[in-house]
Amino acid sequence: MWLICCPVMTGDRNPFRGLRLDAVDATRRRFLTVTGAAMGLAVVGSLPGLASADGSAVELTQLPEYPFALGVASGDPLSDSVVLWTRLAPRPLEPFGGLGPRPVMVQWQVAEDPAFRRVVRSGTARARREGSYSVHIDVQGLRPWREYWYRFRVGRHLSPVGRTRTAPEPGSSPQALRFAFASCQAYWEGFYTAYRDLADQEHDVVFHLGDYLYEYSVGVGAGVRQQQLPADTLRETVTLDEYRGRYALYKLDADLQAAHASAPWIVTMDDHEVENNWADEIPEGNTPTPTRNEFLVRRANAFRAWWEHMPVRLSQQPIGPDLQLYRRFQYGDLVRFNLLDTRQYRDDQAAGDGSDPPNPGSLDPNRTITGAEQERWLLDGFAERSARWEVLAHQTAIAQLDTRAGADVIVPMDTWDGYVASRQRVLGGAAERGVRNLISIAGDLHRSVVSELKADYADPNAPNIGTEFVGTSISSGRDGMDNDEGGLTILAENPHVKFSNFQRGYVRVEVTPDQWLADYRVVDRVTVPGGTVSTRTKLAVADGDPSIHVVGGQ
Amino acid sequence: MKRQIAVVAGSATVLGVLTAVASTAARPDDDPVRLAATPEAVQVVGLPCLPSSFQLGMTNIGSADLYADVELAADGPVVLDRRLVSSWLPAWEPDHTVNARVGVTAPRDAEPGSYAVRATTHGAEVTVPVEVLPQPPKGSGDDLALGEQAVASSTHANFDVCGAVDGNTNSEQWDTLTGWNDGTSGVFPDTYDVALAEPAPISRVETWTLDSTRYPAARYGLRDFDVQVRVGGAWRTVHAVRGNTAGRVTSTFAPVTADAVRIVGLASNNRDYSRLIEVQVFTG
């Protein structure tokens, strides 16, 4: 990795003027000191140094066609840095987005105002074919808890402007945090109307909790989208070019682009970014990649494409089929987010991966959904008690969800119900370490389910240890309804479940030292464009009291 | 874990990342990718629903894992369903070959003859001979539906919509995707349409539903279905089949000039899916 420093430009009506490409050669370490301004550092996160000897390495500084068709994004905010992302793709659904083989130089700017009058950081990155012409700029030296605006440029083409925001200074005490979380966006099952609503709000940060794309064919006509798309979109994604093409298709959506441009995102992944219900090195079975070796190659391809298309740091770049996905984000002493990875290290789903009664597999104390190392990392973090609200931001429900009416208890084997010992260790571990307010946010279910968390659901007197806010899907599952039979059953069978809804949408949260307030935004219809978004309910948790309170909207 | 960047420059640049201490075994790190095609040659007919394909095999015989881009190009009238296969290629011992399917078609007006598909990556190339075969006869006594464009109300993800016009009526080969299975369990009706190359005075349709030793028609085949023909843009039922338990149902009717045939699946014997092995259309 290279550190590049760039001149800080102020008061220039054309902020890109005078930036000489040869002054920011990313193949050499270079530091330019700038009088009267803090030194700007950026870690350029495209692939490390390919110094090819032939003409394919000579950079382009111009492109004939508009290359920002996939929008811009920022992510993984720290108190002094944030990652900026774009992928050049003049023809997004063609191989390499219609580019190649030569690298393309991309200029970037960060400003304190949306008009770019006060540009505080800028630089140039090299977009390479090896990274499908994506760039990841890890902008350094920003001020804490500040809004910034950013944009990219190639030649005469300017990208859309993105808004981002840094995290607060470590140890500070922010008075409020406003964030949103979303998941599950099958392209062919619905329009991304919920993202338009999300983009219209100002969030400090947005979480994506998985199933950003699906490996499946989008189908002839792309379902509700009614689009005629290239044949590549009809194949299940297995190879790297296929995953890249599918990300390009999803990212062409204007509402998704607007949501990315509206705030920094912190992104995890669930199963469908690779394939349905994979577990560590074990494929789903009955797929194009039924063996371990075939699946590991597929996993490497899927991880690689995920990294290329997400605003994440070099530390999240996969090494073959391995990816460091779990990580933490701190918002002063108010909130800490623990982003979990419950796919890469889990034991295979118990009892054949369906819905079953609790069984020897799901109850086996030696089985895990997090893996031992991540669990230790999580529990060690709990012991630090670094923030008033300790949040688990992850894939699927921790709470027990009995899905069968009547005396039988039938629970899904793919959620934490299939890994009861993990639930006991993590929730029990939080209680033992004196975590003040434990909150889980998750997706995966395509329904909203708000629950009180207990370490042992078999014990009717078990205390609440925390609360869980599962958010519904953006589009997966089509329109839905207020509560289907499954939702009514979950409400009736699980006294710890306090709210259920089966529409599409996302969740907004406002956290203060005294209260966690979740706003469940739902869309009346996603199978047509332009649906109406409204608040279905608001649910609160008070500091020190792990119980759910309805405060409005029902 | 020691990591090392291996770089191969060229028109298809390859980046490799060693995931283990560099091997001292005699594994070539210059041009470590080997390409192969299975089968080594393919035949294709210039009909819309007789797709052909080969598996492109990519093997990294070097000591460093790498990402490879294999570019595909066809000459003459041959059409490919992809122009690029990119994949991570691990340097595992023993060698691991990554396979990707490449679909091959030819347009109806393709000149029969010998052509080729070339797959290239840095330092490796494989040429796949493609023979475009003459069109099958579509006269009196011939199956007019063979290889013609099929469209279905839905198709199960494990199946190809072209499976019931591929000329294979053998239910014992159901597992090789030689049939069509709709994609909506328990939901009827299902439709399976075949558009003929041109309007023809048809008088017989042979409907082959799943009927194998393991999956007998009486349990898994279509029970109730309508055979329809399209005349002037409107569907007309020429045979309503009810209570069927046979694998093959022959529908004969007064000749009618139609440009498409539709099977409307109303119920199967186990009430889940419509399953067709083949639909054949004749003028005589």
Image: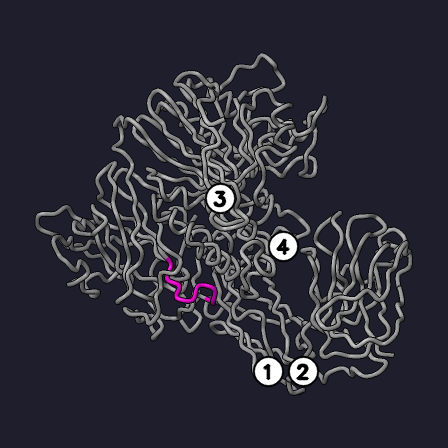
Residue A161 placement (x, y as % from top left): 29, 53
> Which residue in the protein does label 4 denote?
A289
Quick check: marks 1 and 4 in contact, CB under 8 Å?
A: no
For the residues beneath circles 1 and 2, the answer to whether they share a chain is yes
CA gap, disc 2 and disc 4: 31 Å
Chain containing mark 1: B
Discs 1/4, front:
1
Q: Which amino acid does label 2 sit on?
A: Val
Chain containing mark 4: A
Q: What residue type is labelled 3?
A: Met
Q: What residue type is labelled 4?
A: Thr
Q: Is residue B95 visible?
A: no
Q: Residues within 10 Å of mark 4 (few under 14, many from 20)?
A: some
Q: Residue furthest top?
A: A461
What residue appears at the point 62 percent right and 70 percent down from the top-left corner? B103
> Which residue in the protein does label 3 denote?
A269
CA gap, disc 2 and disc 3: 45 Å
Q: How crowded is mark 1: few (under 14 residues within 10 Å), some or many (20 or more)?
A: some
- Along the polypeptide, which appears first: circle 4 or circle 3? 3
> Which residue in the protein does label 1 denote?
B77
Mark identifier at residue B268 = none
